[in-house]
Image (spheres, helix red, strand yellow):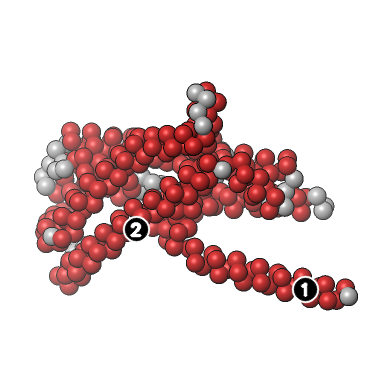
């Protein structure tokens, strides 16, 4: 009888794992939306509760108001900026000859100054062909992000609407006590606030600094490149330098030596320090996140989720570290 019970247990486990894997594979294209909904859930839940208690609103009204407010204040400006960038980038990508001419001019200037040959004509032709191939991928990813946002808000609405029931259901499924579950939830909240709030704030600061710098130094389309600089700042350590270093070198190659030196100096002293110093100082105010966690999270996130992985990658790594810490405390330290 005991043997038959064990067989039934194993069969149930195999079926559970198989169905779970099947569901995971089917939902994988929507993983970005799910992660976004979970992340925003922790961010918006306090506001929903505040409106509910302070203004005596119903849960439905509070959730609807918070989602509309978040769309107007946060998401809509981001979408407008993304649309402007996509439109400008499409102009460049659809006219690769313009970019190619600028690259040729920059390479020839560097070659004259340093007596080195960076690219052959064959390499330049390869670059031209590659630029044209990026147009469709760029536009398709933009449409994918818009669709993911719609699904994310759909999930987020019901998560906030039934937050208490959802948390109780999740708590019953997790093998943790009330105290451990509370600690796990608090740590996850602090990590989400650190990754989701600090990184965009620093990107905004760097973008504004870069816009002012490029405009004052006479770089063409300073606001476009300043915003791009802010977007690239999501990549730790080297992100924004991928924009202001070429910008400074380009200005020098155009015989605007003073402007180029100012861009490089200001970028090294101010923009780089915003990225490398204040990022981790601010993050530690919310959660003591090691820089390696952020770096690995961005790398993994970009590979799995594209642009949105800049945010969700570090959140996933942080969640993994929290679960690992909890497992160590429960099953390793207690057994010693």
Q: Which residue is mark 1?
A: 8
Q: Is residue 254 above or below residue 115?
A: above
Q: Position of residue 70 (x, y in %)?
A: 39, 37
247 sits to left or right of 206: left
Question: Which of the two residues, 237 or 135, is positioned nearer the viewer here?
Answer: 135
Q: Which residue is mark 2?
A: 144
Residue 30 position (above or below residue 45) = below
Residue 39 in view (yes/no):
no
Residue 57 vs residue 7, the one in the foreground: 57
At 50% from the left edge and 28% from the top edge, which residue is drawn?
A: 57
Q: Nearer the viewer, residue 323 or 83?
A: 83
Q: Secondary structure at mark 2?
A: helix
In the rendered image, the vertical position of residue 77 relative to residue 122, given as above or below: above
Q: How many marks?
A: 2
Query: Which residue is more in the foreground, 142 or 279?
Result: 142
Q: Residue at x 62, y 44 (%)?
A: 165
* Point 11% across, 47% down: residue: 254
């Amino acid at each position: 009888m005991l043997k038959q019970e064990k067989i039934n247990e194993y069969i149930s486990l195999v079926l559970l794992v198989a169905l779970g894997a099947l569901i995971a594979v089917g939902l994988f294209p929507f993983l970005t939306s799910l992660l976004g909904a979970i992340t925003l859930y922790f961010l918006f839940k306090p506001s929903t509760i505040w409106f509910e208690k302070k203004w005596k609103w119903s849960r439905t009204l509070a959730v609807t108001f918070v989602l509309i407010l978040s769309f107007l204040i946060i998401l809509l400006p981001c979408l407008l900026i993304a649309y402007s960038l996509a439109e400008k980038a499409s102009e460049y990508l659809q006219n690769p000859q313009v970019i190619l001419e600028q690259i040729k001019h920059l390479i020839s200037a560097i070659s004259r100054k340093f007596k080195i040959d960076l690219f052959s004509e064959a390499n330049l032709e390869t670059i031209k062909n590659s630029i044209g191939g990026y147009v469709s991928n760029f536009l398709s990813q933009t449409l994918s992000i818009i669709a993911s946002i719609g699904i994310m808000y759909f999930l987020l609405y019901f998560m906030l609407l039934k937050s208490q029931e959802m948390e109780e259901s999740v708590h019953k499924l997790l093998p943790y006590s009330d105290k451990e579950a509370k600690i796990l939830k608090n740590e996850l909240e602090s990590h989400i606030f650190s990754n989701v709030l600090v990184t965009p704030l620093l990107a905004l600061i760097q973008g504004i600094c870069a816009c002012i710098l490029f405009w004052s130094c006479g770089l063409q389309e300073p606001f476009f490149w300043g915003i791009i600089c802010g977007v690239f700042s999501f990549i730790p350590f080297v992100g924004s330098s991928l924009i202001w270093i070429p910008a400074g070198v380009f200005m020098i190659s155009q015989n605007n030596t003073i402007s180029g030196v100012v861009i490089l100096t200001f970028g090294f002293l101010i923009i780089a320090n915003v990225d490398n110093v204040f990022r981790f100082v601010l993050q530690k105010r919310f959660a003591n996140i090691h820089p390696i966690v952020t770096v690995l999270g961005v790398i993994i996130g970009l590979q799995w989720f594209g642009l949105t992985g800049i945010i969700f990658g570090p959140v996933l790594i942080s969640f993994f570290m929290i679960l690992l810490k909890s497992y160590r405390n429960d099953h390793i330290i207690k057994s010693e």
